[in-house]
Amino acid sequence: MTPRSRPLYFEGRHGRLYGVHHAPTNVGGPAHAVLLLPPLGQEYKRCHKTLQKLAQDLATAGFHTLRFDYAGSGDSGELASWSLDTWRQDGQDALAWLRGTSGAKMVSAVGVRLGAAVALALDTPLEHLVLWDPVVDGSAYLESLDRLNRELLHRFRHAYRNGSAVSFPPEQLIGHPFPDTMRESLAAYSLVIPDQPPARHALWIDTPTGATESRKDAHRNPGAGAGEAADPVKESYSGHLALAEEFLHVEARCRWHSAMEIENVIMGQPVTRHMLQWFKQADGFHGNGA
Amino acid sequence: METAHSFGRDDHLAGIITRPASASVTDVAVVIPNAGLIHHVGPWQLHVDLARRLADAGVPSLRFDLSGLGDSELPRRRESVSARTRSDISDAIDLVLSESGARRVVMAGLCSGAVESHRAALAEDRVCGAALFDPPAYGDRLYHLIRWSERYLNLPRILRFLRRKLDESRGRREKPDPATQPEPYRPMTAEEFAAEIETVSNRGVEYLFCYSGNDDYKHRRQLFSILTPATPRERITVFHFRNLDHTPVLIEDRRILADTLLEWIQGKFVQ
C-alpha cells in the first residue's frame, strides 16, 4: 500500500515552516526518519518532484520522511534576512519536529546542493547521510549563480525590453528574493570536513553537470567537459571525499546551472533510484521489508 | 495566515489556504491550480506572491497541486486526465468555500493553469470569475503583420541573430536544444475557445485576460478578433503587458500581475 503524505506547518524559530510528512504505512524494525534538505531557489523548484518521489519511495520502504521549505522560501513564512545560518536552524527545527512526530531513534539526512551545507551542520548524529551534488565552495557557487542571473537577465532584456537596460535589484537572484545576509554567508562558506564523521554511513552522489559545475566553481580543472568518467571527477573532489565512504557518479541530466533549462524540471530518478537502494542496503533493510 | 490541507475525494490533494488577517472584503475566494509541471508555489513563486497580496487586501485563496503534480498524489481510482482535473478543481472549490466562508470562486491560472481555470468556469456554476494569465492566443492579420515586421524590419534583432549564430558555430554559446524549446500552448481551436467564452460569459462570469509580451500575442485587441458577436464585451477585460515575460522572472513584474488581479477583483466582486 502506498503511504499517504500530509502537508503541514510546524513551528520553527524563524516562524512557521511548511513541510510534507511521508509516514510509512508499515514499520517492521525500529523507526528510522529521513530529513530531505532542499537546495536554493530555482534549483529547488526544478527538483521538487524528484524529492517528492524520493520521499514517497523512502516511506514505502519504511522510513518516516520530511520535506520542508526554509523560512523565507516556498510556502514557509516570510523572512527578510535569511542566510545559511537561518537555514541551518530551520534544518535543526525540522529534524526536531520529525523526531518528535515519528518517535524515531535513528535519523538520516539527504542534502541536495546547498542543502548539503545544512545537513553537515545538523547537531544530531546521523545514521546515514547523502550529499547530492553538494556545493563545496560558496563564493564560487555564488559566482555561478550571478553568472546565470546575468544570462537570464540578458535574455529577458532582449526578448521583452528591446534590449534596453533593466534595473535588476541586487536583492533578487534568478527570480527569487536573495538578501545580502545570504550573499554574505555564501561568500564565506566552504565545505569543511568536521572532526567527527557526520554520519555512520555517508554517500556522495555526483552527476556529470554537478561535478563539472562544482569543479568550475572551485576553479579546478576548468577545461573539463561534462560526462567524464567517474575517476577524474572523484579526483577533483580530493580532500572533500573523506566525508563519504562511498562515491557514486550517476549519469543523470541535472544541468543545475544551464540558462537554457532554467525552467525545466530535473528528472532525477536515476539519482534517487541509487539513493533508495543505498538507504535500503545501509539500513540492513529493516524497514517494512517491502 | 496560511494553513496546509490534504483534501479531495481520496484525500490525495495538497494545497495552502491563505486567509486575510482581518475579515474578508468580498464573498469570493480565489483558486489557483498549477502552471504546467511547476508545483503549487508557481513559477518563480508567482502563486505565493499572488496569494499573499490578495490576503493583504482581504481576499482568501487556495493554491494547490492537481493530482500527480507537486505535493499531490494520484487518486486511487483511475480516471482520464480531463475527468481527474475536473474533479480536482471541484474538490478544491469545495475546500476553499468551506474553509474561507466565501460563496463564490474566482479561478486564476497561468498557461495550462489558465486553460484549466477557463474549463472550470465552463463546468462549475460556483465560478464567478476567471483570471487567465497567458491563455492560448490566436493570431489575426495585425498579429501576423507585427510579427513579420519585428522579424524582418528590426536591424538590432537581425544583428543579434547573426551574432548568436556565429557564437553557436564557434562553440561560444550553447545551442538551444529543440526538445527544450516551448511550443505555443493551444489545446483547443480558436473557434472552440471563442464558443466557450461566449457560453461562460453569458452565464454572468467575468473574465480577466492578461497576456505577456511573448510571441503569441502582439496587440491588445488580438483576443477580440476571435470572440463571437454574442459574447458580452463588458465581461471581458484584457491587458497586454508587452514588457512582461510568460513566467514573470522579476519580482516587480509579479507585483504588476498581483495588482492587476486585485484591482479587477475589487472592481468586479467587492460591493
Image (cartoon, coloured by chain):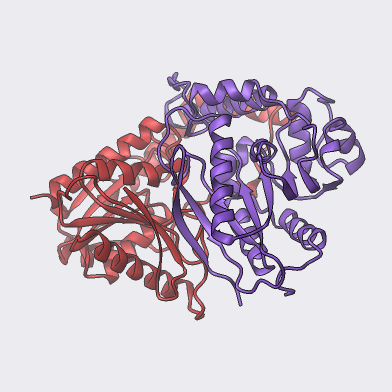
Residue at 27% in and 62% down: B99
Which percent across, then down, holds residue B177? 66, 44
Looking at this view, name the residue that lies furthest to the left.
B271
Viewer-closest of B150 and B4: B4
Which percent across, then down, holds residue B112? 43, 56
Q: Quadrant of residue A14?
A: top left
Which percent across, then down, holds residue B139? 37, 49
Residue at 23% in and 43% down: B262
Q: Which chain is purple?
A: A
Viewer-closest of B182 and A20: A20
Which percent across, then down, holds residue A29? 72, 69
Please give left or right for residue B96 compared with residue A25 in the image. left
Please give left or right for residue B228 compared with residue B217 in the image. left
Viewer-closest of A113 and B125: A113
Please give left or right for residue B148 compared with residue A222 in the image. left
Q: Is residue A229 visible?
A: no
Q: Quadrant of residue B146?
A: top left
Looking at this view, name the residue that lies furthest to the right.
A231
* Colour of chain B as rendered: red
Q: Is residue A136 visible?
A: yes
Looking at this view, name the residue that lies furthest to the bottom.
B77
In the rendered image of this protein, does residue B45 appear above or below residue A8? above
In the rendered image of this protein, does residue B198 appear above or below residue B258? below
Viewer-closest of A159 and A154: A154
In the rendered image of this protein, does residue B189 appear above or below residue A207? below
How many badges with numbers are in the image? 0
